[in-house]
Amino acid sequence: MNHQPPIPPVEPTPTPSAKQLEARALARRHRDRMRLRTRRIRRTVIAGATSVFIAAFSGIYVQLATGHDPALVAAASRRTTLTASTTSSSTPTSTTTTTNSGEDDTSTETGTSSEESSTAASSESSTGATAVTTSQS
Amino acid sequence: MTSIDTNILATAVGPHLFWITSRAAGVAALLLSSLSVCVGLTIGGRFTKLDRLDLRTTHEALSLATLVALAVHGISLLGDSYVHPSLADISIPFLSSYKTLWTSMGIVAFWTMALLGLSYYARSHIGVKRWRKLHRLTALAWMLGIAHSLGEGTDAGQIWFLAMTAIAVVPALALLAVRLSESSATSQAHAK
């Protein structure tokens, strides 16, 4: 014989009262409202952050395209200054070349100074500027 | 503008797109972090009657947006053809040869902000009181970030940038000063 344990009687679940149902609905509505508010705040922040990024990007893009970018303007002015100093330094060298055209040393001298000048112009550094000054002296 | 003009413009700006992206993300990060600090300080203080839960949600969203902007700011530099940094250069302090001090300041500020900001999600493990104490250091990281932007930023000498920084930073600094004075007064009262 198979003896099975007796099945306990199932107690009927108490039906919630109208007050309880109302309270649950109120809590659900409150929770939904909170969730909606949180979502709205997050969306606003994302939209704001994206707008700030786009505005900054556009501003910098236009600044760069119109040639008013601070970094590029500074680099260009540095390059111009160096080129100007290179040009002024090469003038006395050419005079020397004309004066001492018959001597052997002149070709070497001219070669050195032009080499230094080109280095200074391309490097855009303070060391390059010093090289120009040295060639002038 | 004709199509030829537009093409010339695009060709001229094209090589700098990564650089522009990095600069724009840096600007966005500066504004978002300053706003986040402001909101964070108003949560604890008595400056506003706004709902605290709303303020907390705003603070959290702003902080996450700041971290995203900072990630874009660093990662987009990897494509820059002028500085051409490596991943290590932009993530490990004192490794980059380009304006080492200012760059390192930015890197330290980012890691501090990321660690302290994301630790919010592990505050039950850290302990709420300990986490609150640690979270105060975020203000230092924010200040380090501002120093980085003023010291290294390409636009740091521009009037629009200085004005924007002042508008974003001054209110946050004022709130921070008020909070610090309040907390020092409270600690003095407790000592008595």
Image (cartoon, rainbow, N blue to C red):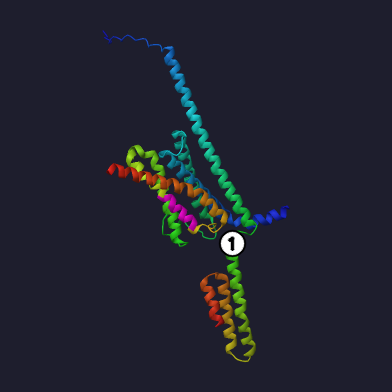
Local secondary structure at mark 1 = helix
Q: Position of residue A71 (x, y in %)?
A: 57, 61
Residue A44 coordinates in the image, percent (x, y): 54, 37
Comparing B7 with A89, the one in front is A89
Label 1 is found on which chain of the structure?
A: A
Q: Is residue A129 visible?
A: yes
- Quadrant of the frame with the C terminus of chain B: top left
Residue farthest bottom in this picture: A102
Residue at image position (48%, 47%) is: B171
Circle 1 residues within 10 Å: few <14, some 14–19, many ≥20: few
- Asked if residue B175 is among those painted magenta in the image, a careful observer would answer no
Left or right position of B186 against A126: left
Left or right: A133 as drawn, with respect to B183: right
Name the amino acid, label 1. Leu
Q: In the rendered structure, which segment of residues is drawn in magenta?
A: B140-150
What residue sits right under mark 1 in the picture?
Answer: A72
Residue placed most toward the observer, B64 or A26: A26
- Closest to the observer: B183 or A89? B183
Relative to A70, residue B39 above or below: above
Q: Position of residue A69 (x, y in %)?
A: 60, 59
Q: Residue at position x 45%, y 57% from top? A: B103
Which residue is found at the position 49% from the left and 43% from the top?
B65
Residue A25 lies left or right of residue B15; in this view the side is left
**Looking at the magenta stretch, what is its main secondary structure?**
helix
Q: Is residue A97 left or right of residue B106?
A: right
Q: Is residue A81 above or below residue B110?
A: below
Q: Residue furthest right?
A: B2
Q: Is residue B148 on the magenta stretch?
A: yes
